[in-house]
Every structure is written in C-alpha cells, then in structure tokens.
Amino acid sequence: MSLFKYPIKPWEMPELTHLNRIRSRATLTPYPTNKAALKAERSESPLLKMLNGKWHFKLYKKPEDIPEAVIKGNFKDAKWAKIDVPGNWTMQGYDKPHYTNVIMPFENKPPFVPEENPTGVYRTDFTVKKDWCKRRTILHIGGSESCTWIYLNG
C-alpha cells in the first residue's frame, strides 16, 4: 500500500513549496520577560523546547518503501539506529553525500527524481508542558533537505 496517495509524487512538483505550514519568517525566540529577552539565552527560555539529541532513525531506498505502520505509529523502533539531530545522515554514515556544483550524480529529468530516492525517517518522543495547550505552539524545523512530512502522536 502506497504511503502517498497523490496522482503525482509531491516531491516531483517544483511548484509545491509547502502544505499545511505557516508562512516562512525569521526565527524568533519567545521569552517570558523583557529581562530574559535581553539576556538572550535561547536554550533557557521556558517557552521553547529544544528537540536536539539522539533520535531513532531508519533509512529507506525511496518514500514508497516506508511501511504504513511507521506513519501510523503502531510499530517498534527499538531496533532502529540512533542518529544525532540536528545532523545530516550522509555525514553520520548513512548513504553517500551528493554535493556538487557541476554535474548531478544521477540522470537529470526534471521534475522526476531517480527511482532510488533515499528517504530518512526520524522518530523521537517528547512532551510539551501542560500550559502550552492554552497557547499557540509552533514546531520549528530548523533545517530539512527536500520534502519533509511531520507526524505527531504517531
């Protein structure tokens, strides 16, 4: 069963820049007081939760290979590798980096991507403070290459 039920693969749609996302803007850190804001210690803000650290990680050859159970959250990730976030999986021993400014290391037929399209799945557990349920809370992805799908509570 295909994970992506679209007539065309979203990652092959150059005109598609986002789905269900707020507009891009400068990243600002919220602080509870002016004094805390002047101190500007981002990691100390009680209104921010950093998700950096070791996450469970599994690399698939292409997005279509991701089992539906992984997306629905009813699977065990205990045997998955651990990977540093933030971090690039190609710099942590998964797949080969493709950095070039001359010729792409694969056949180029835009907007189509190669059949083998390495796709990483990251998984972690976290809890937000109860009082955060009373305010707008934003999940900020500081960096991502190509397409990114986020599933919460799954």
Image (cartoon, grey):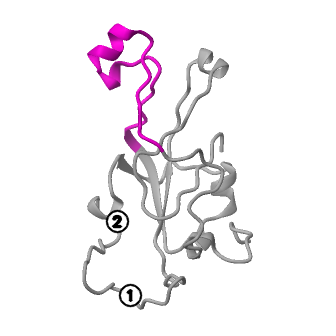
Q: Quadrant of residue 134?
A: top right
The part of the chain drawn in magenta is 25-54
54 relative position to 20: left or right? left
Q: Quadrant of residue 81?
A: bottom left
Q: Is residue 53 a member of the stretch shown in magenta?
A: yes
Amino acid under disc 1: Phe
Of 44 and 80, nearer the camera is 44
**Percent x, y of residue 54:** 37, 42
Q: Residue at x 29, y 20 (%)?
A: 40
Q: Which residue is mark 2?
A: 94
The mark closer to the camera, 1 or 2, is 1
Disc 1 secondary structure class: loop
**Percent x, y of residue 127:** 55, 27
Q: Residue at x 58, y 50 (%)?
A: 150
- Main SS type for the magenta part? loop
Q: Residue at x 45, y 27 (%)?
A: 49
